[in-house]
Image: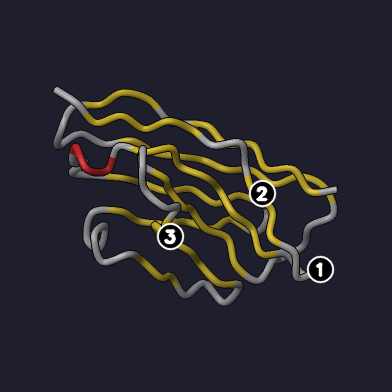
Amino acid sequence: QVQLVESGGGLVQPGGSLRLSCVASGRIFNPFVMGWYRQAPGKARELVAAVRADGSPNYADSVKARFTIFRDNHRGAVDLQMNSLKVEDTAIYYCNVHANDNLHYWGQGTQVTVSS
């Protein structure tokens, strides 16, 4: 059983920063991909950023140069540093792990609200 616990969401003004953290527990070892998705009201869930086991990252065009993803295999964690936040970044952010059993696991979601 794999569990993902997220933290770090909240309310921030435009231009501000937040750091999201996700820690995986259970039978997980060096998963294929760890990443973050988000879902805004009335919109489909979309990939924000992901990082493969070899450390190579992938970002949505809308967050490139503003967000940075960090993976810590020792802790089983993946963090998302979000800078220069915009109102349109407001969403529920979900941690996702594509594990070695070829299954996808999801966190419970953490709300990020960017508003003045």
Q: Mark 1 — residue?
A: 101
Residue at position x 61%, y 72% from top? Answer: 53
Residue at position x 45%, y 42% from top? Answer: 93
| Residue closest to the far front | 42
The residue mark sitting in front, 3 or 2, is 3
Of label 2 and label 1, which has the lower sequence position? 2
Give the distance between the C-alpha atoms of the residues marked 3 and 2, in whole angstroms. Answer: 23 Å
Cβ atoms at labels 1 and 3 below 8 Å apart: no
Residue 81 appears left or right of 101:
left
Assess disc 2: are there few (<14), some (14-19) or many (≥20) residues with their C-alpha within 10 Å of its C-alpha. Answer: few
Please tell me the numbered disc located at residue 47.
Answer: 3
The residue mark sitting in front, 2 or 1, is 1
Residue 12 appears left or right of 108:
left
Residue 33: image location, x then y, percent: 60, 67
Assess disc 3: are there few (<14), some (14-19) or many (≥20) residues with their C-alpha within 10 Å of its C-alpha. Answer: some
Name the amino acid, label 3: Leu
Name the amino acid, label 1: Asp
